Image (cartoon, rainbow, N blue to C red):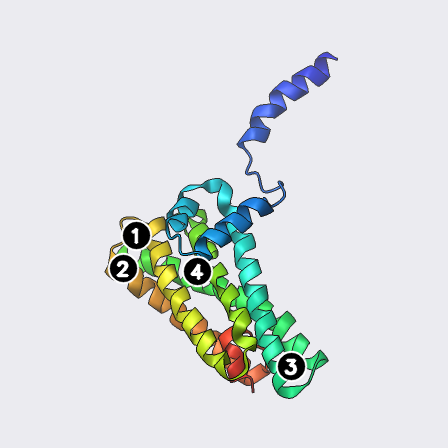
Amino acid sequence: MLSRTFARRSGAPAARSLPRWHLPVDWRRALSLQRRLLSGDLSVIGEAARNQSDTRPALAVLLIGLFASGLGAWLWVLFDTGVVGHSALRVLLLGSLASLAGWGLWLAVTWHALRSIFQISVDWPNLLRPLALVGGFAVWQFFMLAGPASFAIGLVTTIAGVLLTILAVRAAAPEADDRAAVISVGIGFGVYALVLSLLADLTGVGSGLFVHALG
């Protein structure tokens, strides 16, 4: 009994000090964040940057956005070509995974640009949360299925995503001025767009706006 009591007492502080990654995603919080973002409530970006508990919900918002983007792009390809299985693999599955990897590259390059060019240090989680949240704006690319308007919808949504990412960097790193945020995000987006464009053209794998570059 004493050993069990001691174990509980000694283990409790250590358990409290560990990151709470083992907890399930708070989907109610994730959907609330996404709803507020899509409704134009930009204060949610700063809120996500400050709240450490929003890491998983923000990532869930990102995944929802990327999946919706891939689904809309796949439906556009499906309606345009009538090919089901091959396009589902290249666009919906592999394309969505490529978009997620590309977003991670965008995050990494933006973080590195802030540090190396502007000597602005920001912790990874603090930058990840608001950038993941605004990445969820890609959910609007679901409406790329709308035939002739597909490219315009994808382009407008992508541009809006870049502008929101600039706001996200300002929220995560208050010491970054407009110039630092714009240049850092611009470099990150440039690498992201180049890699995904080449991937779509050379391998036929793409999602969202880049589905129009499929070779």
* Helix, strand or loop status at disc 3: helix
Label 3 – label 2 distance at C-alpha: 41 Å
Contact between labelled residues 1 and 2, with CB atoms less than 8 Å apart: yes
Mark 3 or 2: in front is 3
Q: Which residue is mark 1?
A: 120
- Tell me, for residue 180, which label it has, or none: 2
Disc 3 residue type? Answer: Leu
Q: Give the mark nearer the N terminus: 2 vs 1.
A: 1
- Residue 89 seen in the figure: yes
Mark 2 or 1: in front is 2
Label 4 – label 2 distance at C-alpha: 15 Å
| Residue at the (49%, 44%) spot, across then down | 54
Q: Is 46 on the left-hand or right-hand side of 75?
A: left
Q: Quadrant of residue 66?
A: bottom right
Q: Give the mark nearer the N terminus: 4 vs 3.
A: 3
Contact between labelled residues 2 and 4, with CB atoms less than 8 Å apart: no
Contact between labelled residues 4 and 1, with CB atoms less than 8 Å apart: no
Please tell me how crowded label 1 is: few (under 14), some (14-19), or many (20+) other residues with Cα within 10 Å.
some
Q: Is 95 on the left-hand or right-hand side of 85?
A: left
| Residue at the (66%, 21%) spot, across then down | 8
Disc 4 residue type? Answer: Ala
Q: Which residue is mark 3?
A: 78
Q: Quadrant of residue 78?
A: bottom right
Q: Which residue is mark 4?
A: 108
Residue 135 or residue 190, whichever sits in front: 135
The spot of residue 153 in percent (x, y) is: 46, 75
